[in-house]
Image (cartoon, rainbow, N blue to C red):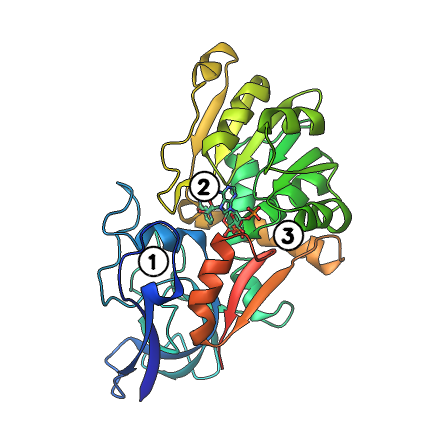
Amino acid sequence: MQSRELKLARHPRGKVRPDDLSLDVVTVPEDLGPGDILVRNSWLSIDPSVRMRLGPTGPAGYLPPFRIGDTLAGLAVGEVIRSRDDGFEPGDTVLHINGFREFAVIREDGDTLAGAGGVTKLDTSEHPPQAYLGALGSSGLTAYVGLQCIGELTGGDIVWVSSAAGAVGSLAAQIARLRGHYVVGSTGSAEKVRFLSEELRLDAAFDYHTPDLADALAGAAPDGIDLYFDNVGGMHLQAALSHLRRGGRVAMAGAVASYDGETANAGPNNLFQIVAKNLTVKGFRAGAYDHLLGDMRAEVGSYLRDGRLVATETVFDGLESAPDAIVAMLGGRTVGKTLCRLG
Ligand SMILES: NC(=O)c1ccc[n+]([C@@H]2O[C@H](COP(=O)([O-])OP(=O)(O)OC[C@H]3O[C@@H](n4cnc5c(N)ncnc54)[C@H](OP(=O)(O)O)[C@@H]3O)[C@@H](O)[C@H]2O)c1
């Protein structure tokens, strides 16, 4: 059986270009070994983390970089075509990490992405399959864990979420708002600021393309902030450290401003604020909190069910569009969860 796969053609220099990736045809083995499951992928998750794996080296302690010629990996949802695992049968919908290809042979004891994406059967009777890549999947878990476990969100906290129009940010901002907090969101364009104010109904929103990020933050949260949900790093983190109130917390989910390597050394220059104001700054990877998926799905699922949470998607069609999807997502030209739909 023939399948198209997206491979790393060359290491990007700075921003990713579509031709850093190549679409190749491979043969998928017809004969499955014991425990193998053949899946036709239907949805691919397009995540910023893939950028960190495209360079010749990656951050220490993180997922290893891809080598030239490797097929990219990423969270995906697909349908079981054939199975030699007693727990799975044709027609099952499954979540796994062998994305960026049309067909995949997966195994329950296969790799995960630092705990995320172990082969799981999905019940799609209530929510569509791709929701398990976004609001009810890794994006939702990152938002939930960042607020709940890392940021220790407490009554009355004022919250700032960066990249708030994105997959994780839009969920973190809405969960905090739905729990009754004053929430500020930042993003990269006037249109997305409108999305934050009018569609996500955040209390305040601003475009970070401003001469003074600290001023913009102070305008949006004049009394300071208690929790910064950091998706961006760099100068955003610097502004947060200055504006956090005593005892404030930073939940560091990511640092997308540095992923393309062009701005890796930008800020923060005010780390002493952590000492001065008894701040707690803590990073995390959602895969380590998979045991909280049920709790997250109970809360986010209920918001989805009664229409209180907006789960916006930007969908690209066909595996051939995946390079454009990656470039668009990193360039800020997508809103909510970025997905690639196959078949
Ligand atoms: N810790 C974990 O387990 C975990 C899991 C998933 C994701 N993450 C992290 O969470 C963050 C958000 O991920 P996501 O999937 O929700 O992606 P996303 O926010 O949907 O997409 C990335 C967004 O980052 C923004 N961006 C790009 N370059 C930027 C820059 N230089 N400065 C400020 N913003 C920039 C763009 O939006 P604008 O238009 O707003 O610029 C872009 O759309 C990332 O840092 C990601 O690595 C962490």
Helix, strand or loop under label 2: helix
Q: CA distance from mark 2 to mark 3?
A: 27 Å
Which of the two discs, 1 and 3, labels the residue nearer the N terminus? 1
Residue 257's disc is 2
Label 1, secondary structure: give it. Answer: loop
* Residue linked to disc 1: 112
Amino acid bearing label 2: Ala
Residue 20 appears in the rendering: yes
Q: Earlier in the sequence, mark 2 or mark 1?
A: 1
In the picture, measured across the screen, residue 298 lies left or right of residue 71, that is: right
Q: Residue at x 41, y 31 (%)?
A: 266
CA gap, disc 2 and disc 1: 25 Å
Which residue is at 74% across, 44% downward?
197
Q: Establish if 318 lies above or below 288.
A: below
Q: Nearer the viewer, residue 55 or 170?
A: 55
Q: Are marks 2 and 3 in contact (CB under 8 Å)?
A: no
